[in-house]
Amino acid sequence: MYEDFSERLFTHYVGGAWRAPLGTRAIPVVTLDGRVAGQVIAAEPADIARLCKGLRGADTAALARFSARVAQAADDLAQALAMQGACPDRTAMVQLGAGIGASDGNMRHPVCLHGSVRQAPQRFGQRLGQGLACGLVYCPPANEALFATLLTCLAAEADMPPGAFNLLHGDPAQTLSMLAQADVPCLQDAR
């Protein structure tokens, strides 16, 4: 997929750049066949503080670019999910891209998206697009870290405004708690 993809698992994506985590707690990323594909480093309060400095929204042109990029990479996204146990489904990934483009962008606060893409890809895409309107904090479950990293690469390729799409790895519940302690008004949406 991408030459430096495994290195991206070690980093967060904040403010439009891949950034070294400020914590040290590692969580293994395991493939369907039990191989360790890498590890993610859980977000810590210092990562949250860095994130809070730059949350901002994206315009409809940026959403359209991202939606198109996701549709183009549907096979790669399905493969990333399949490596961690989900059935590869190109159609579901095209629906995800369509959901991004169909979002209404009426959010008033940043969105912390922390649920699985597996159950409802189009709904996940809509919430992703809505979050991008005010600033998205994506906190994927560890069993979707490969997919989340690839999706983040696509957001970067779509030239999202810095701070519109942010990826924090780790335990979603702990990350949500840290965001609340930092007074970040996030809509907590599991799907």
Image: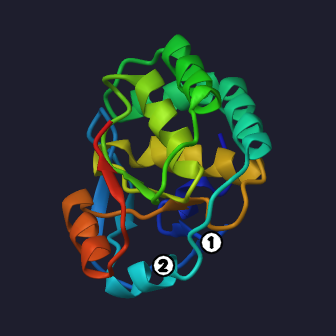
Q: Residue at the location (73% across, 49% down)?
A: 59
**Tag nearer the camera, 1 or 2:** 2
- Colour pattern of the rendering: rainbow
Q: Is residue 76 above or below residue 113?
A: above
Q: Residue at the location (48% across, 78% down)?
A: 52
Q: Earlier in the sequence, mark 1 or mark 2?
A: 1
Point out the image quarter for the N terminus: top right
Q: Residue 148 location in percent, x, y?
A: 47, 47
Q: Residue 4 location in percent, x, y?
A: 65, 57
Point out the image quarter for the C terminus: top left
Q: Residue at the location (47% across, 15% down)?
A: 89
Q: Residue 97 location in percent, x, y?
A: 61, 27
- For disc 2, the marked residue is 52
Q: Label 1 is placed on what type of residue?
A: Gly
Q: Label 2 is placed on what type of residue?
A: Cys
Q: Quadrant of residue 43?
A: bottom left
- For disc 1, the marked residue is 15
60 and 73: which is toward the camera: 60
Residues packed near mark 2 inside 10 Å, few (<14), some (14 to 19) or many (20 plus): some
How far apart are the two marked residues, 1 and 2, measured between alpha carbons? 9 Å
Label 1 sits on a secondary structure element that is: loop
Q: Quadrant of residue 185?
A: bottom left
Q: Residue 154 location in percent, x, y?
A: 67, 44
Q: Residue at the location (57% across, 34% down)?
A: 104
Residues packed near mark 1 inside 10 Å, few (<14), some (14 to 19) or many (20 plus): many
Q: Quadrant of residue 175?
A: bottom left
Residue 87 left/right relative to 109: left
Q: Is residue 68 above or below residue 17?
A: above
122 and 33: which is toward the camera: 122
Label 2 sits on a secondary structure element that is: helix
Q: Is residue 20 above or below residue 91?
A: below
